[in-house]
Amino acid sequence: METLVKIIITTGDLLGLWDTYAWLLERLTHGRGRIINFHRVADDKPYPWMPLGSIRLNEFEKRISYICSKYKLLTLQELAYRILMDEPLLQDSMVLTFDDGYKDMFSNAYPVLRKYSAPATVFLTTGHIGSGELFWWDKIGYVIYNSRLDRIQLDGVYHSLRTTEEKRKTVDTLLAEADTGSEDRKKMLINNLVTASGVKIPDGLGEGLTLSWSEIRAMSNDGIDFGAHTVTHPVLTRVSLEQAKSEIFQSKIEIENRLNKPVTTFAYPRGMAGDFNTQTVALVKQAGFKCAVTAIPGMVSQQTDPYQFGRIAPGDNRRLFKFLASGLWYDLQSRRSG
Ligand SMILES: [Zn+2]
């Protein structure tokens, strides 16, 4: 099945179907928006323990070059503004977003964005900026890949760590395991894992991985927008409403104070269905954000709720990306569900 999908995507691309579909639909509709959801832009030697949502630098540059040849880039604020003001969307419009606030945004992505004069929005998890605190998924990756044990016991279950392949599988299992249940349970599981692994996470590792405020300031003065992504990256429906409010409000206030600019865009942590609800959306509005992005796959039209913008993953390769950005997949999905 997977091979068949690959063949279809490759053949469609070679025949130019995806670009044609995108072009045609844009002209038949009143224009649609696409918000791309990047995370990390890894250089040639990515940390083996952090494959999550990475795209390689050379692939990233090719992707941006393609995007600039086919699409009109605008900022998320501009896209939201058009919807809020009931103005038609621009044809072939696209927005680039980067989640979490990794340092490779500054060292790898930013020089490429500058070269192509491409605007972008970066969503910052403010508690991780300048604190040295690793994201929970990176803690799992780091301790598993650096553990010298053959196996590790967690909640009565043994996980094998003898080879890189076994470690990779264990990381995947533990990421899924930690990503269910409450935020308190997640914290406990990760603390237990760090202890059981026998690995000490070095001080300063987090600083080397996340943006600093001076890097953020430099980019902010040079066309890159910053939005909020909470303080500690909890799934907002898995914490109390009071805590959700504090996470949403505090992240906005901190960025505004540091950059001396209004922060109007928000990204829900994890961002899939169930990771935000009507109460979360109400808090985001109450905080003064003008729009919010999810991680739910989808295109943006004039009718889209600006507090639930869907996004498109950059995909593993350029052909898949072209296919996704054409909108065909989402059009087929909405036909099936509608
Ligand atoms: Zn995130």
Image (cartoon, rainbow, N blue to C red):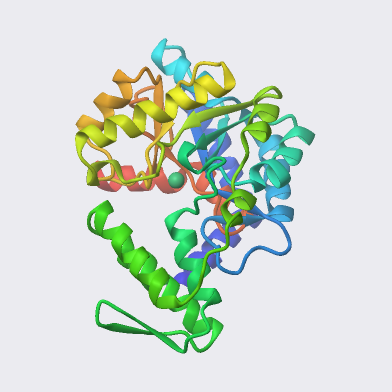
| Residue at the spot 49% in from the left edge and 29% down from the top edge | 227
- Specify whether 299 is left or right of 129: left
Asked if 222 appears above or below 268 in the picture, the reply is above
**Nearest the eye: 180 or 191:** 191
Residue 115 coordinates in the image, percent (x, y): 79, 35
Q: Does residue 32 show up?
A: yes
**Nearest the eye: 109 or 92:** 109
Asked if 167 appears above or below 293 in the picture, the reply is below
Placement of the N terminus among the 4 image quadrants: bottom left
Quadrant of residue 258 within the rendered picture: top right
Asked if 159 appears above or below 134 in the picture, the reply is below
Quadrant of residue 269 within the rendered picture: top left
Placement of the C terminus among the 4 image quadrants: top left
Residue 254 coordinates in the image, percent (x, y): 47, 26
**Nearest the eye: 120 or 147:** 147
Residue 168 coordinates in the image, percent (x, y): 49, 76
Residue 146 coordinates in the image, percent (x, y): 55, 75
| Residue at the spot 28% in from the left edge and 48% down from the top edge | 336
* Number of on-image labels: 0
Q: Residue furthest right?
A: 115
**Nearest the eye: 116 or 302:** 116
| Residue at the spot 34% in from the left edge and 45% down from the top edge | 234
